[in-house]
Amino acid sequence: MSKQVKAWGATSPEKTEPITITRRAPDDEDVGIDIKYAGICHSDIHTVRSEWRETSYPLVVGHEIAGVVSTVGKNVTRFKVGDHVGVGCMVNSCRQCSNCHDGEEQYCSSNLVLTYNSKDPKDGTITQGGYSQYIVVDQAFVLRVPESIPLDKAAPLMCAGITLYSPLNHWNAGPGKTVGIIGFGGLGHMGVKLAKALGSEVTVFSQTNSKKELGFQLGADDYVATSDPDVFSRLSQKFDIIINTVSAEIPLDLYLSCLRRDGTLVQVGAPKDQLRISPHSLYARRIGVNGSMIGGIAETQKMLDLC
């Protein structure tokens, strides 16, 4: 049967408050999860403010979810009651398009169902996220959390973690590769730890040296303050991959100068304004500029197993 659940929701772009929501009754393919932790993502704030697309209020956000399985449908084979699990940014997809068949559900071309502010194909309601006590999710979009990862540490991996792991994985970060991480906030922290776990040499680009000690504690091989005018000339043509986590306009041509021939800059931050790049920065050394958005379910599980 359906269940009334306490939650913290947005009732307008300006207000969040305690509310009660209804979770649908689990069907045969569903997993019911008692939520223990839910991380805060900047996407949550954009959605609450209705800045990216129209938000349906009241809305519960939160897509970095970690909890414990409390119930399973009769066809669920991957999970049992008591398992530690996670839920990320999506809870369903069409499962028929080429992207879904390739395990890239986040790029579903037909019906990507986000964890909040999407239409749930199972009951037609608007999906509600993780700032709540309990959630019901199809088993195909539930992730197993290894025993080695505490649930509070697992939650931010569901979005921030996979947002950095996916481009590192796709562009083959690993031994012998040099990786630069622009920005050292929540995404940047993840980028350093994951790139090191994959065996890469990692450099942090940050505005100042205020977080330098933390950068080295997390495993960075180098940490540079971009306020130093000599940084970019010193690091010219050093990197195979640079990932930009910053959600503001920065002089990308300077960072492109730090890429080797055939190097790649990957944009994962979401600035409001358009990116500005000189064509000369690209063709001079066959440089690529790409985007990346979270990751598929199998890839996210691969990341969790790595951690």
Image (tube, helix red, strand yellow):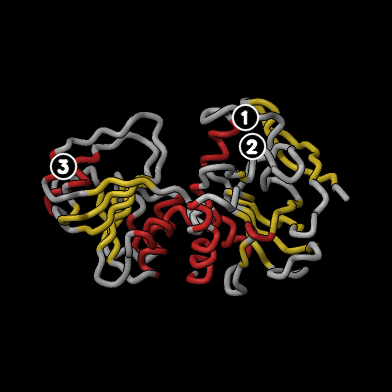
Q: Secondary structure at mark 3?
A: helix
- Name the residue located 57 percent from the left edge and 62 percent from the top edge: 153
Circles 2, 3 touching at the beta carbon (< 8 Å): no
Circles 1, 2 touching at the beta carbon (< 8 Å): yes
Count neighbours of disc 3 (C-alpha within 10 A) and say few if under 14, some if 14 to 19, many if 20 or more.
some
Disc marking residue 25: none
Q: Between disc 1 and disc 3, whose residue precedes?
A: 1
Residue holding disc 3: 281
Residue holding disc 1: 55
Count neighbours of disc 1 (C-alpha within 10 A) and say few if under 14, some if 14 to 19, many if 20 or more.
some
Count neighbours of disc 2 (C-alpha within 10 A) and say few if under 14, some if 14 to 19, many if 20 or more.
many
Residue holding disc 2: 117
Circles 1, 3 touching at the beta carbon (< 8 Å): no
Q: Secondary structure at mark 1?
A: loop
Q: Disc 3 residue type?
A: Ser
Q: Is residue 119 left or right of residue 73?
A: left
Q: Between disc 1 and disc 2, whose residue precedes?
A: 1
Q: Is residue 287 left or right of residue 303?
A: left
The alpha-carbon separation of the residues under discs 1 and 2 comes to 6 Å
The picture quadrant where one finds residue 249 is top left
The alpha-carbon separation of the residues under discs 1 and 3 comes to 38 Å
Query: Looking at the picture, does residue 16 appear above or below residue 182?
Result: above
- Name the residue located 32 percent from the left edge and 53 percent from the top edge: 181
Query: Looking at the picture, does residue 37 appear above or below residue 218?
Result: above
The one of 269 and 109 positioned closer to us in this rendering: 109
Percent position (x, y) of residue 207? 30, 44
Query: Looking at the picture, does residue 160 appear above or below residue 151?
Result: above
Q: Is residue 256 left or right of residue 219?
A: left
Percent position (x, y) of residue 27? 80, 55
The alpha-carbon separation of the residues under discs 2 and 3 comes to 39 Å
